[in-house]
Image (spheres, helix red, strand yellow):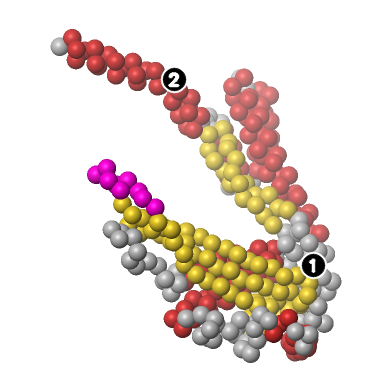
Amino acid sequence: MDRVVKQKDHKMKRIFHVLPFIAPIILVSSCTTVIQMQKTYPPERERPADSGKYVFVNFYDYRIPENIKEKNEIAYAVAVRGYIDGLGANISMDPGETLTIADTLKGGFSVSSMQLPEFTDTVRAICAAYGADLLISLDSINLWVDWNISLEENDDGGNTLVRDFFLYANNYMTLYTPEGEVIDRCAGEKSTFIKSKYTIFGMIGGPTLGKAREAVRLLSRDAAKDCMGKFYPFTESYTETLFKGGPLNKINQLIIGGHPEEAVGPLKDLAFASGRSMAKKASYNLEVVHKILENRRESEQIMQEFRK
């Protein structure tokens, strides 16, 4: 009986030893709330003059058996569609710019033939036909699924073979002037984890490009946004925390609801007229609000400069 009591006492001591370390974490997490923040940055590069109208052509013929397997044609068509979506997301940022889709599958060209001097005439002809200031050429696409094998411990204490599958989507683009001069070349190389598969043999089955079409579209879209994004403002998302509790809860609703400017006055009142603990929390929240307002001001200024 004494031994049982001693064991219980020992467990209680272990619990009380741990509590001092856990309590501050619980206290902090229960007294704060996470909010989304955004910060806008100016373009990395200036766009060419008079670049109001873009025309897009996909010169990569994915119907050629030497390029891809026939069963993967749909996945490659989806990649082209995703790339166009990404271009449109950037170009739509400026209401004065337009994107025309001239051809999503223009045959008769290869990566090597596009390096020849006569390809300049092709670019000129396309830009003239559509009255475009710039040509966006999708030169090549490469999609594939790869995997690696690892051992993972199972519930029985043994090991199980696990295959982790990854999708790769590489899209290569060139930006031309109406005269056929190269402005920029970009390798939009993206990858993402697809799934894990547990198997005894480790070599059977797995996802295919046909089954991963939505992931292909998203990767190609992001590749286009990266390639053209250097000519456009970029907005980064991150998080901050706000103290909550008592009068802060109502003020936080103003901030989260998109009206941070209305929270400035009440937070200042709390910071100067409350007790020490509440004053510190209000001051901290006020700093976050000032960040939000400053980010908003900078974003508006960057977008005004961009659209001039």
Quarter residue 136 falls in: bottom right
Residue sitting at 62 percent across and 50 percent down? 237
The amino acid on which the numbered mark 1 sits, given as a three-letter code, is: Arg
Q: Nearer the viewer, residue 294 or 161?
A: 161
Residue 47, label in figure:
1
Q: Is residue 230 left or right of residue 74?
A: right
> Which residue carries the number 2 mark?
20
Disc 1 to disc 2, how far (Cα)?
57 Å
Classed neighbour count for the residue bearing mark 1: other residues with Cα under 10 Å, few (<14), some (14–19), many (≥20):
some
Over which residues does the magenta segment extend? 150-159
Total of numbered circles in the picture?
Answer: 2
The amino acid on which the numbered mark 2 sits, given as a three-letter code, is: Pro
Callout 1 secondary element: loop
Q: Earlier in the sequence, mark 1 or mark 2?
A: 2
Quarter residue 301 falls in: bottom right
Q: Is residue 89 left or right of residue 210?
A: right
